Structure formats: C-alpha cells, structure tokens
Amino acid sequence: MIRQAERADKDKLYELYRMLVPNSRKMNVVEEQIDIIRNDPNNFLFVFDKNGEILGTVTLNICIQAMHGTRLYGVVENIVVHENHRSKNIGQQLLQYVEAYCRSINCHRIMILSNSTRERAHRFFEREGFDGSVSKGFKKYF
C-alpha cells in the first residue's frame, strides 16, 4: 500500500535514504519535518508499506508557474527502494501513484533529478516514460 509518511516512519526513512546517499553527512530525518510535509497540500512524502514494513519512498512537490496558465508541474525527489526489495515493481508503483496524482490535478509534466552516476536508476526512469535527453539538471548545494 502507498500512503503518506507518518512520524513513526522516521527511522525507516532514514534507513532508505542512507541506501540512496550512503556517505551523506548532512542527513537528518526529523519527525517535525514529516509532519510539515504531511500537512502541506503541495508536498508529499509517500511510502510503500507492506504489512508495516517500509520498502520504498518518494517525495513529490507540486509547483505553480505562470507559463502554462493554471497548469501545475510535479518534481520528484528521493525515490528509493530498499536494496533487498529492488526489481519487484515497488519503484514502478510509487512512480505510477505519483503520476496518477499529478494527472488528477492537471499537471502538465513531472520532473525527476537523478545523480549522474546512477545509471540503473536512469534506465528505470526511461522505462517508466521519462526522457533523460530533454533537459540537463543543475544543482548548487549550500
């Protein structure tokens, strides 16, 4: 089942994020931030919950703009499936859930940024219909 994350998911989220960025020194998953996201109508932290075990997660941010009238767009971040449960369609289900939601609110696109070295993830995103050749992403960390 896919649902919004709750405070009690904090440790499992940390474990998943550690699989995504094992050497991060800035990682800090806090219950209050999970609550803030949960209560914000434009931001979502979804988890894939199988019998109380969190096997995957994805963050979706809904953004407004002026270029396409009132149409919104979605930004997907931090999609990760537990390393012992990959290739079981969990990531696919998470992305399909996000896409269905974005379509339901009339988004005109979904964007995903991915570390340039994560080639397996890139192949997965392409199988799910995302085109990695359309744009080039840039990041500036503080």
Image: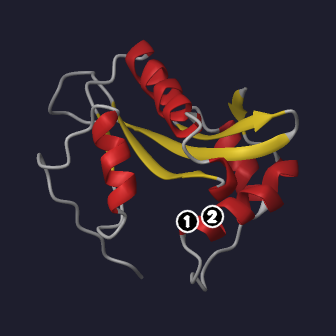
Helix, strand or loop at disc 1?
A: helix
Image quarter where the C terminus lies is bottom left
Q: Is residue 135 above or below residue 48?
A: below
Outermost residue toward the left?
134
Q: Which residue corresponds to mark 1?
A: 20
Q: Is residue 133 left or right of residue 127?
A: left
Q: Is residue 21 above or below residue 76?
A: below
Q: Amino acid at mark 1?
A: Leu
Q: Is residue 140 left or right of residue 2?
A: left
Q: Nearer the viewer, residue 129 or 58?
A: 129
What residue appears at the point 63 percent right and 58 percent down from the top-left corner?
A: 83
Residue 125 on image: x %, y %: 34, 43
What residue appears at the point 14 percent right and 51 percent down from the top-left corner?
A: 135
Residue 93 on image: x %, y %: 55, 29
Q: Which residue corresponds to mark 2?
A: 17
Q: Assess whether mark 2 and mark 1 are in contact (beta carbons under 8 angstroms).
A: yes
Q: Is residue 6 left or right of residue 67?
A: right
Q: Amino acid at mark 2?
A: Tyr
Q: Is residue 13 above or below residue 67?
A: below
Helix, strand or loop at disc 2?
A: helix
Image quarter where the N terminus lies is top right
Q: Is residue 69 left or right of residue 81?
A: left
Residue 126 on image: x %, y %: 28, 40
Q: Is residue 39 above or below residue 23?
A: above
Other-residue count near label 2 (Cα within 10 Å), few / some / many at <14 / 14–19 / ≥20: many
